[in-house]
Amino acid sequence: MRPTKLMTSGDLLVDRRYTFAESLMREKDWEAAAELIGEIVRLAPHWAPAWISLGETLAALGRKDEARDAFTTALRLSPEDELGAGLRLARLGALPPTGAMSAGYVRALFDEYAGHFDRHLVEKLAYRGPDLILETLCGICGATGRPPHFRLALDLGCGTGLMGEAVRPYAVTLAGCDIAPRMVERARRRGCYDRLAVAELTAFLDGEAPGSADLVLAADVFIYVGDLAPVFEATARALGDGGLFLFTVQDVGDAPLGFVLGEDMRFAHSTGHVETLLAAVGLDGVACDPAVLRHDGGRPVPGFVVAAQKPVRPL
């Protein structure tokens, strides 16, 4: 889905051609689509969405060098990268995957998605992130005798508030953040948060007093983050002694970098890499349980529910 400001080329006839080209792409008629979109970019060379679509069709035809050039042009025309050109370049090996998913892309994606986010996740994708995290949290509290009562819980990438609604009974103060303003507005309407911020994850965590949080949660958020080290470092700073950090990750098995950017343009991480990063910031692993996070195209998406704890320092 394109951000509103990129919805039109400014030429009605070009827009109509593009609509037909999109139908050719849906039918996987890549040759015809590439030919038509090639004409469109000649007529509207300023229109980034057409260059993205040209790149997609060329990549589908195996013409990777030409696809790379098309995505590079899209990125030049739309430097905030709301369309995800950087992700597509990373998929082709033309950019490192670490910073490929721009804030502009995630913001635009979820601002457009906000209105039907809950229904799509729960009904179409059988999304279970909040339930899985809450089950793990209650299991840890039950096994250790810790009361399920938290002074300050932070919900990272809160979306419309599904995780917040689940954890609200256990938190005195619940604060959430999301990079997409429309998502935050939907979360505000849910009425379960004490504080909400439109913010990137690490910026939000850095805004909390060091050691103030005793629970940090991230449900299905890290599929949009390649390098987890910065957010893990910020989480460790925000957590007080004994504080818990629970999150889900999509499973990749083994990967040289510890994570990969998949064909679905989502990041998947290896559990070994996640555990290494947690240890590096001084967090102890408590649980790492396999789970089906959601379904995509009718297929289960495997992942893990991870729990870590900040050690209690000796007096």
Image (spheres, rainbow, N blue to C red):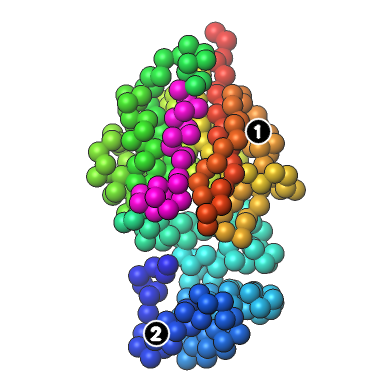
Position of residue 115 relative to residue 227, above or below, is: below
Q: Tell me where residue 83 appears, x and y as whole percent.
A: 48, 67
Callout 2: helix, strand or loop?
A: helix
Residue at left 36%, top 85%? 10
Whether 137 is among the magenta residues is yes
Left or right of 183? Residue 216 is: right
Residue 164: quarter of image: top left
| Residue 15: numbered disc | 2
| Residue 227 left/right relative to 24 | right
Q: Position of residue 208 (x, y in %)?
A: 41, 33
* Mark linked to residue 180: none
Taken as a whole, is the magenta stretch helix, strand or loop? helix
> From the image, which quarter does the C terminus lie in?
top right
The amino acid type, in three-letter code, at marker 1 is Glu
On the question of residue 40 being in view, the answer is: yes
Do we see residue 225 in this rendering? no
**Which residue reaches farthest top?**
315
For the N terminus, the image quarter is: bottom left
Question: Which label belongs to residue 275?
Answer: 1
Where are the magenta residues, as a range?
118-138
